[in-house]
Image (cartoon, grey):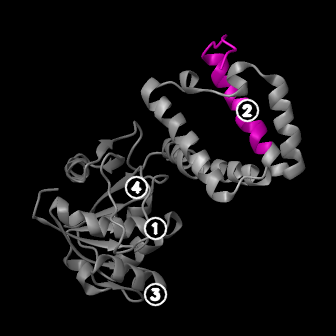
């Protein structure tokens, strides 16, 4: 997307929508406003971005934008796109982009039917709750993009100007979306999955008697160190530590007995994680039992 030549409207005013609205101007894209299905979200987005933000009826300014970013929930994309077309707010000279990691371009079918260009942009990143005090950033993130050749070129320029690295899957467009579902599952495991695991670890540490503040600080330090080692070694087997890596089966059994006293959920998750760790250790052929 060429600097100083694009006008965008963001449909959806959650974390990603507000992050785009705040960061796009630095990439040379004028943001004309945001729209949300929720009045509460509308007020928060208006305060966070300083831009016009509305709910209810779609604003006519949407029609004046060159690019529409749909950052609503995945299951709402097709419906919102259809309604925009029905209200004659999508022109054949516009580009409509959804930001769902799991979906192909089929939900934008109504926009494509009237001649609009369609595409997708999914930043592999998390963003803060919208606030004037919190500045979002896309820098360093991978961005999955899709669309026609011309749309991909434009999106590639845009994501680079935002500090991201563009990437594409082998399957694209309106083809079956299972590869995108696998990609998005990977993203969820790396984000929500890690958070859920950390929440379990925090509960266990507090049940053992640690203060929450001490437990959280200690576990975050440990988790960051593990991820740092993964980044350095580029191998889960090399970064793996703990009783599974050392072959301490008795320690694993004691862990399971202690977790069973806390909850079945905790034990089952630990068992699943231990099974995966055993596979990692086996693939790495780790024979050293020392710490």
Q: Which residues are magenta?
A: 268-291
Q: For the residues marked 1 and 3, what is the alpha-carbon distance in whole angstroms?
A: 21 Å
Q: For the residues marked 2 and 4, what is the alpha-carbon distance in whole angstroms?
A: 38 Å
Q: Nearer the N terminus, badge 4 or badge 3?
A: 3
Q: Which mark is residue 105?
A: 4
SS assignment for the magenta stretch, majority:
helix
**Residue 283, picture quadrant:** top right
Q: Nearer the viewer, residue 236 or 37?
A: 236
**Residue placed farthest to the left in the image?**
4
In terms of secondary structure, where does tag 4 sit?
loop
Q: For the residues marked 1 and 2, what is the alpha-carbon distance in whole angstroms?
A: 40 Å
Q: For the residues marked 4 and 3, what is the alpha-carbon distance in whole angstroms?
A: 28 Å
Which is more foreground, mark 2 or mark 4? 2
Q: Which mark is residue 78?
A: 1
Q: Residue at x 18, y 62 (%)?
A: 26
Tell me the quadrant of the picture where the N terminus can be found.
bottom left
Q: For the residues marked 3 and 2, what is the alpha-carbon distance in whole angstroms?
A: 45 Å
Q: Is residue 150 left or right of residue 18?
A: left
Q: Nearer the N terminus, badge 2 or badge 4?
A: 4
Local packing at callout 3 (Cα closer than 10 Å; few below 14, some 14-19, many 20+) is: some
In terms of secondary structure, where does tag 2 sit?
helix
């Amino acid at each position: 997307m060429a600097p100083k030549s694009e006008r965008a409207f963001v449909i959806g005013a959650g974390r990603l929508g507000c992050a785009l609205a705040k960061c796009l101007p630095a990439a040379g894209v004028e943001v004309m406003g945001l729209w949300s299905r929720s009045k509460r979200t509308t007020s928060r987005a208006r305060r966070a971005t300083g831009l016009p933000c509305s709910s209810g009826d779609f604003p006519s300014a949407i029609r004046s934008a060159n690019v529409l970013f749909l950052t609503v929930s995945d299951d709402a994309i097709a419906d919102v796109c259809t309604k925009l077309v029905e209200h004659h707010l999508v022109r054949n000279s516009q580009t409509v982009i959804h930001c769902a990691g799991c979906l192909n371009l089929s939900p934008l079918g109504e926009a494509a039917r009237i001649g609009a260009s369609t595409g997708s942009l999914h930043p592999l990143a998390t963003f803060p709750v919208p606030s004037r005090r919190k500045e979002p950033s896309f820098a360093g993130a991978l961005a999955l993009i899709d669309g026609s050749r011309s749309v991909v070129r434009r999106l590639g320029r845009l994501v680079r100007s935002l500090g991201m690295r563009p990437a594409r899957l082998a399957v694209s467009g309106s083809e079956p979306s299972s590869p995108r579902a696998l990609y998005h599952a990977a993203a969820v495991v790396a984000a929500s999955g890690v958070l859920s695991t950390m929440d379990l670890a925090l509960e266990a540490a507090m049940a053992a008697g640690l203060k929450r503040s001490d437990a959280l600080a200690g576990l975050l330090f440990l988790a960051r160190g593990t991820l740092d080692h993964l980044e350095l070694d580029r191998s889960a087997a090399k970064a793996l530590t703990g009783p599974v890596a050392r072959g301490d089966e008795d320690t694993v059994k004691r862990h399971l007995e202690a977790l069973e006293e806390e909850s079945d959920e905790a034990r089952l998750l630990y068992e699943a994680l231990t099974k995966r760790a055993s596979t990692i250790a086996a693939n790495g052929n780790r024979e050293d039992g020392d710490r």
